[in-house]
Image: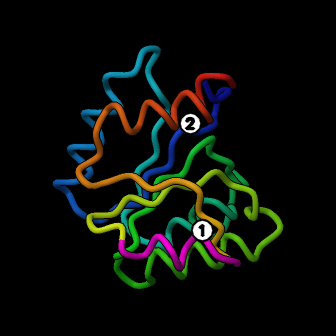
Amino acid sequence: MAEKNSIDVLLVEDSPDHIELASRVFQKINPPLHIKIIQDAEEALNFLWGREYYKDQGPMRPLLTILDLYLPKMSGSELLRQLRLDPRTRDLSIAILTITGNEQHTLTQDPYLVKHYLRKPLELNSFLELYNLYIKKK
C-alpha cells in the first residue's frame, strides 16, 4: 500500500456512473486503498506535477493511474502524451479505462507506451491483476 500522504490509485474519469462503479471495485480491496479521483485532465496534470491547487503537496506518484481517454478540457490521450514526455512522470504505471479498446494499437506506440487496458465498467478481476502487479507488492 502507499505510504502516508500518498496515493495507491489515481482514477481520472469524468463519468459519475463509471466513478461509482470503479469505487465499488476499489472498496472490495482489503486493506483499503488510498484513492484519488480527478474528473479532468488538466487537474490531473496539476495533481501529478504539484502545480496550482496542489502546489503545497508537491508532485505525486500514485502506484497506479487509471485513465479515461474521453475527458473534458483535454483528452486523456493528450494527458497521457504529456505525462510520458515529462521526466517526472514518464515511468508512471498507467492503465487506460475504455469502452471500445479501439485505441489500443496507437497507444502502445511511442510516446504513449500503454501496457494495460481495462474495459468499462471496471470489473474486480481485471483490476485485481493490476493491483497484484503494482500495488500489493509495495
- Which quarter of the image is occupied by the C terminus? top right
Residue 108 falls within the magenta-colored stretch: yes
Q: Which amino acid does label 2 sit on?
A: Asp
- Which quarter of the image is occupied by the N terminus? top right
Give the residue pinned by disc 1. 46
Q: Which residue lies furthest to the top in this view?
A: 31
Q: Earlier in the sequence, mark 1 or mark 2?
A: 2
Query: Where are the magenta residues, as a range?
Result: 102-110
User: Residue 78: percent from the left, percent from the top?
Assistant: 54, 82
Q: In this view, does 78 lie above or below 17?
A: below
Q: Which amino acid does label 1 sit on?
A: Asn
User: Residue 99: percent from the left, percent from the top?
Assistant: 26, 64
Find the distance from the CA under tag 1 to the CA under tag 2: 17 Å
Residue 90 horizontal side relative to residue 21, left or right: right
The answer to which quarter of the image holds residue 6 is top right
Residue 8 falls within the magenta-colored stretch: no
Mark number, residue 1: none
Residue 72 horizontal side relative to residue 16, left or right: right
Picture colour scheme: rainbow
**Residue displayed at 67% across by 51% down:** 60
Q: Which residue lies furthest to the left in this view?
A: 17
Residue 105 horizontal side relative to residue 73, left or right: right
**Residue displayed at 46% across by 15% down:** 31
Nearer-the-camera pick, 101 or 63: 101
Give the residue pinned by disc 2. 8
Dot 2: what SS? loop
Query: Is the C-beta separation of discs 1 and 2 under 8 Å?
Result: no
